[in-house]
């Protein structure tokens, strides 16, 4: 009898935790795909011939396919089934000035030298090529141990100093970022913390209206869970040796 109860409790926990994971991911990424979709439309990415998605598979690839984009994928991990197994810091298999657009969502924090990776991206982009990406700011450590950096908007502008900034947006506000951190405790916490998070899930849902009210009153965007941005490789940012 005890074994049956234990098994039943385990099944309930798995179902409940699965719902919690999906909810936490959906909330943490709620503006991400909205912004990405708007940038794809605004910069006519769909009409571009050569589109590179850095970081293969997952929700991003599904979203890009939903947007009717035809793209090539690279990833350092062969298990993700990329078109090419390649490190973003060294994309020597791709010719200079050969790519129209790069999509790079939540990848740069996992790169040991993001400045070098951005320079590689600039090398392979055509003049007028677009780089669309996102990076975390206030967000738990994930995909350990390969999680190296967090970024401010000024750090992003420094990384892309040889590009022209088209837009740079906070993914969400101060209070929403705190709520994301709370929800992500299930994904990143210890086993005990995960169980506590699942038990408190109804409370997390209940306080969501308060977060929405607070968000309308507190306009501070000095903390966000992440940034999404678009940069263009423009002639005005060529160095003297390239003019």
Image (tube, rainbow, N blue to C red):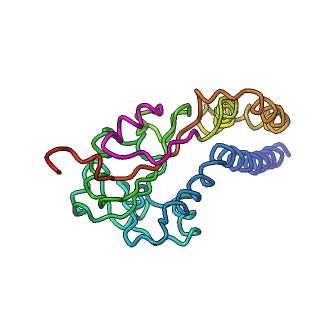
In the displayed structure, would residue 215 be above or below residue 20? Answer: above
| Residue shown at 43% from the left, 37% from the top | 147
- Name above or below for residue 180 compared with residue 81: above
Pinpoint residue 173: horizontal percent, then vertical percent: 65, 34
Q: How many marks do you count on the picture?
A: 0
Nearer-the-camera pick, 14 or 237: 237
Left or right relative to 32: residue 233:
left
Which quadrant would residue 74 be assigned to in this image?
bottom left
Does the magenta segment cover residue 153? yes
Q: Which residues are magenta?
A: 150-170
Q: Is residue 25 left or right of residue 152?
A: right
Task: Give the percent coordinates (x, y) of residue 48.
Answer: 42, 70
Residue 97: image x %, image y %?
Answer: 25, 62
The answer to whether residue 215 is above or below residue 93 is: above
Q: Residue 208 at what x, y percent from top left?
A: 80, 37
Residue name at image x 83 percent, y 42 percent: 2
Q: Residue at x 61, y 30 (%)?
A: 221
């Amino acid at each position: 009898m005890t074994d049956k109860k234990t098994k039943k409790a385990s099944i309930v926990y798995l179902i409940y935790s699965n719902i919690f994971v999906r909810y936490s991911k959906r909330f943490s990424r709620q503006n991400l795909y909205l912004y990405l979709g708007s940038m794809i439309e605004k910069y006519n990415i769909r009409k571009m011939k050569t589109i590179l998605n850095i970081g293969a598979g997952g929700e991003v690839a599904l979203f890009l396919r939903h947007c009717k984009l035809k793209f090539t994928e690279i990833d350092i991990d062969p298990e993700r089934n990329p078109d090419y197994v390649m490190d973003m810091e060294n994309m020597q298999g791709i010719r200079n000035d050969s790519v129209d657009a790069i999509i790079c969502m939540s990848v740069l924090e996992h790169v040991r030298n993001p400045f070098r990776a951005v320079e590689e991206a600039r090398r392979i982009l055509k003049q007028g090529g677009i780089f669309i990406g996102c990076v975390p700011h206030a967000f738990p450590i994930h995909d350990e141990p390969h999680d190296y950096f967090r970024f401010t908007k000024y750090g992003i502008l420094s990384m892309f100093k040889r590009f022209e900034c088209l837009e740079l947006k906070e993914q969400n506000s101060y209070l929403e970022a705190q709520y994301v951190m709370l929800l992500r405790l299930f994904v990143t916490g210890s086993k005990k913390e995960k169980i506590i998070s699942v038990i408190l899930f109804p409370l997390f849902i209940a306080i969501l209206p308060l977060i929405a009210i607070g968000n309308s009153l507190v306009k501070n965007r000095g903390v966000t869970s992440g940034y999404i941005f678009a940069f263009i490789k423009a002639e005005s940012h060529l160095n003297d040796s390239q003019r």
